[in-house]
Image (cartoon, rainbow, N blue to C red):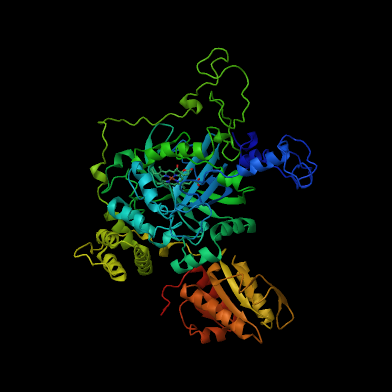
Amino acid sequence: MSKKDGFNENSKNEQLEQFRSDDSGKTMTTNQGLKVSEDEFSLKAGERGPTLMEDFHFREKMTHFDHERIPERIVHARGYAAHGEFEVYESMKEFTKAGFLQDPAKKTPVFVRFSTVAGSKGSAETVRDARGFATKFYTEEGNYDLVGNNIPVFFIQDAMKFPDLVHALKPEPHNEIPQAASAHDTFWDFVANNQESAHMVMWAMSDRAIPRSFRMMEGFGVNTFRFVNDQGKAHFVKFHWKPVLGTHSLVWDEAQKINGKDPDFHRRDLFDSIENGDYPEYELGVQLLSEEDEFKFDFDILDPTKLWPEEDVPVKIVGKMTLNRNVDNVFAETEQVAFHPGHVVPGIDFSNDPLLQGRLFSYTDTQLLRLGGPNFHELPINRPVCPFQNNQRDGFGRQTINKGPVSYHKNSIAQNTPMPASESEGGYVHYQEKMEGRKVRKRSESFKDHFSQAALFWHSMSKPEQEHIKEAFSFELGKVERKSVQQQVIDMFANVSMELAREVAEAIGASVPTGGRSEAAKSSPALSQENTAKKPSTRKVGVVISDGYNGSEVSEVLQSLTAQGIQAELISDKLGKRKGTDGTELEVDHTFLTADSVLFDALYAVGGQDLSKKFVKDTSYFLNEAFMHYKPIGATHEGKKWLEANDILNSAGVVYSEDMNEFTNEFVQAVAAHRHWDREIV
Ligand code: HDE
């Protein structure tokens, strides 16, 4: 199908339209369509008497309310989603026959849900954790789900251990503490006693685990999949999403404060960006390996605790996804969406990665509980946009009204329909991998090296990134109560880096291991966020301003910032309009009470005239906090006084100039740089 016969990037939206309801302006009815005459008082025997059983309206309203909640996801409960579209840059025909990867003129509707892993549905969003990055492509050949994370490797090598990992990570069962955090004894006890976790733990302790925004993080399919072309030839494939804005993170102190100031920080950022028309974009990349190269590496390509270094296996950029529409209803869409790595289309197949194999069971199983039965594929958000039919029938919440007597295959009454399709007609045929082996509960010897890639990650980090990792370990292990657990972890990570183990041991009062890894392993520059794209657009700058600001000059700076895609929001001691020297007025967006420096990427101090002591104090607090978080700080006019008073005027990433053009240029560059690690903080 092409645009002219109905399929396009709007296909899902058009399908959802049939289910949308806008009740404004309408009469209230019961669920049976009966008009309701009164909705505040229950039916009683006398004005002061008991409520009557026959009050069907009360019973229906209350029963529905009582049943509003469904089980939250066992992991990835806290999530937020948006709609969008995907386009491929060039045909991938050589590698895969997947229909949505053939034609650059075609756009496929997508739905993406981002999430944290450990926390409950209501937990804060800037916790230290991996982030889920799950994409549903509504293709003409059925739904394809790419259910990934923002970290390219996983904690464990076999799905059998997933319940153990999650039990150890979740709040401890005797006191349900801590929420959405790995800084506790059972998690680290699991790590030390399941050393395959070493590599992912390094990522989880790095800046990757505290992303600045869902819009600024990479996504990875993690598991190894297969592409199969129309000749039946297969390649192993790893999937990547590369954010066009680059990969950027918060700093830990800031992340913790945001959890208090705005626990919805990441969803607000995504929602607002889409509402503003700043559509998040991610390029799809694939790493491809021919079947012949399966054993060419010093790690097993089926091992999900290993990545394929991009310098060895380049990431081929093949397409782009744009998120351009917020959901209408979070429960109906974001909560009820059901992802599954087993939702594939012809041309995409599995590998024998033992984690993936287990995932292929778990995702359907969990939806059966969460969504209450086997008909969750009929929920509007989960429906394919192509026709779907088979002989499955009945079950809770069935919506399709299947006509006719036939619900079995094979049959003659309905001319043996619905009927399987041959491969050439689009029927899914599994890749015929040759298998032989004994039935064993074992792990391959080739999965046994747990530390080389953890060390590769460590040695690929810039100095500031390494410092952050040391601090993260010191924080997390500092929260662990059992000395024996702390020591086991220190001893374990000496296998990654002696420097790391020694400094963390010193920070938490543990013994420094006697031996460990110190030689520089190979490094992979692609792993360091220092080498990511750096752009000013969509960054949020807090502008501290008061009456008597230099009217024309400040307005000019603000206009130039906006022209660069920067969002300047005004902060003052009270809401309302502030007046400039030339009579111009600017509307204040936040007060010192409703905002905080942690909610901005950068600050621009303008000031004004006749400032109260409190104004000066609040501004200093904002500037100092931003300074501590290595953020760009700019000042013009009276703003200079604050830089001087706080002794930060000549620091890295602090921009002051009397020439507005020069100021704007330098400040925009400083904002694009994201953080200024070479700033000296004492
Ligand atoms: Fe998941 N995972 N997972 N996971 N996962 C779930 O399915 C599971 C793993 C990922 O926004 C659950 O619908 C097992 C790796 C995302 O709705 C559950 C194993 C990766 C999401 C489940 C893994 C992921 C989930 C819980 C080890 C990165 C959220 C609710 C074998 C590639 C999707 C649900 C959304 C959700 C099982 C490991 C990503 C229980 C058994 C590795 C993004 O089925």
Classify 442 as above or below 602: above
Q: In this view, does 4 lie to the left or right of 206?
A: right
Place residue 597 in its image quadrant.
bottom right
Residue 463 locus on image (x, y percent): 35, 69
Residue 538 locus on image (x, y percent): 57, 63
Query: Can I make out residue 102 in this image?
Result: no
Residue sitting at the far left: 514
Which residue is at the front of the view, 170 or 624?
A: 170
Which residue is at the front of the view, 334 or 418?
A: 334
Which residue is at the front of the view, 471 or 277?
A: 471
Q: Is residue 314 left or right of residue 16?
A: left
In the picture, which quadrant includes the C terminus?
Answer: bottom left
Place residue 458 in its image quadrant.
bottom left
Residue sitting at the far right: 37
Residue 398 locus on image (x, y percent): 59, 30
In the picture, which quadrant includes the N terminus?
Answer: top right
Classify 648 as above or below 423: below
Q: Is residue 329 left or right of residue 412?
A: right
Which residue is at the front of the view, 29 or 597?
A: 29
Image region (quadrant) for ligand 1: top left
Residue 244 locus on image (x, y percent): 51, 57
Classify 422 as above or below 544: above
Classify 516 as above or below 104: below
Residue at 46% from the left image edge and 29% from the top image edge: 428
